[in-house]
Amino acid sequence: MTYESPEAADDRLAARLAPALALLAAVGETGHVTRAAEQLGIPQPTASRRLAALSDLVGAPLVLPSGRGIRLTRTGRTLAAASGRALGALATAAREVREEIDPASGRVVLGFLHLLGRTLVPSLIRRFRERNPGVRFSLAQGSRQDMLRALREGDIDLVFVAPMPLGDPDLAGRPLADQELVLAVPPGHRLAGRARVRAAELEGEELVTLEHGYGLRQITDDLCAAAGFEPRIAFEGQESETVRGLVAAGLGVAVLPSTDPGLAAPPRTDPGLGAPARTDPTPAVAGVVEVPLSPPLFRTIGACWVAGERLTPAARAFRDHACAAPLDLGPGFRPPTVPGTPD
């Protein structure tokens, strides 16, 4: 005789009880077989036979006569209560499935880098919901590495990251915008009054940057490597505004997205790399002066999704909305120059 563990027996019994969840819940709710049968749209004799079969399956009576109706036994009450909870969970899941496949009332799980929550994400969602007010969003923020991992594992429908994961056959994407990156320094720093700064001039400077796994860290490391030196990392953080705050405190310099409207003005004649950009430099953010890099440095922000995987209608509609038209995100941005990847 094959031994069956109690856990396995419980699973087997649950599987055989599952088709009768609605009947058990209805009997528990109405306290009457006839009413339960009417509620489910089945004949009363059919409901009675199923209850008898369930009692034989469980090995104990589930209902007992009570006047003109019935009452649940303790075993019946236990199963009826569990059936009601299980049906509630299934109803919730059915609603989520319906919303997922209905672009007018679906849900989009969107992942993005922290700094993109300032302008890009609110702008895109606001305009999308003007035409699709029933669509809900679940927002996830984190490092580029974490967002791409969650995308591959199916926890996220769509991510906005920079730089884009070009050359990854598992992912597809389309560029949304190029964002200028600048050197952020304290007002009294030796480079604060410059018109532009070459990457090579950062050799020996203490850099404040993000941890490995963040796109800005990759860009900073690549910039220093291209200039021929190993960066001196003074502090590592997980959020760009913290990095900016450390720069304001005089603890180093950083390569960060531009926040200074003046840096996004039409190109002007550059008086030379060694000449002052302003006679009285004004910090773009309190305690921070932003100096353009030479040559100008941009990062491409792109929408990415799993290649070949069918997005839900709501997620696909939002992706197409994000990729359809040039974004008006204000200073520091320009139309993208990096091509997209196949779907």
Image: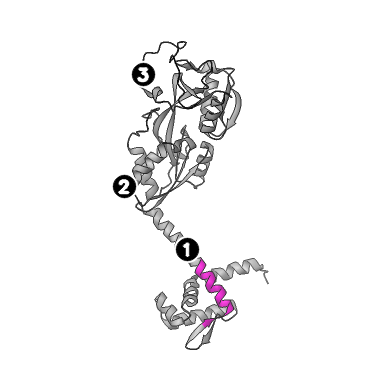
- Among numbered discs 2 and 3, the one appearing first in the sequence: 2
Q: Is the N terminus in the top left, top right, bottom left or bottom right quadrant?
A: bottom right
Quickly name the residue at label 1: 90
Instruction: Residue at 42% x, 44% y: name it.
Output: 308
Quickly name the residue at label 2: 131
- Horizontal side of residue 186 vs 330, given as left or right: right
Instruction: Residue at 48% x, 80% y: name it.
Output: 31
Query: Could you tell me residue 29's position as x and y percent?
Result: 47, 75
| Label 2 with label 3: CB-CB less than 8 Å | no
Specify the segment rendered in magenta. 71-85
- Horizontal side of residue 30 vs 2, given as left or right: left
Query: Could you tell me residue 267's position as x and y percent?
Result: 36, 18
In the image shown, does 21 or 196 lie closer to the viewer? 196
- Between the residue at mark 1 and the residue at mark 3, the CA separation in whole angstroms equals 59 Å
In the image shown, does 66 or 253 lie closer to the viewer? 253
Quickly name the residue at label 3: 267
Instruction: Residue at 34% x, 42% y: name it.
Output: 127
- Among numbered discs 1 and 3, the one appearing first in the sequence: 1
Vertical comparison of 76 with 328: above or below: below
Helix, strand or loop status at disc 3: loop
- Tell me if I can see residue 245 in this picture: yes
- Between the residue at mark 2 and the residue at mark 3, the CA separation in whole angstroms equals 37 Å
In the image shown, does 58 or 116 lie closer to the viewer? 116
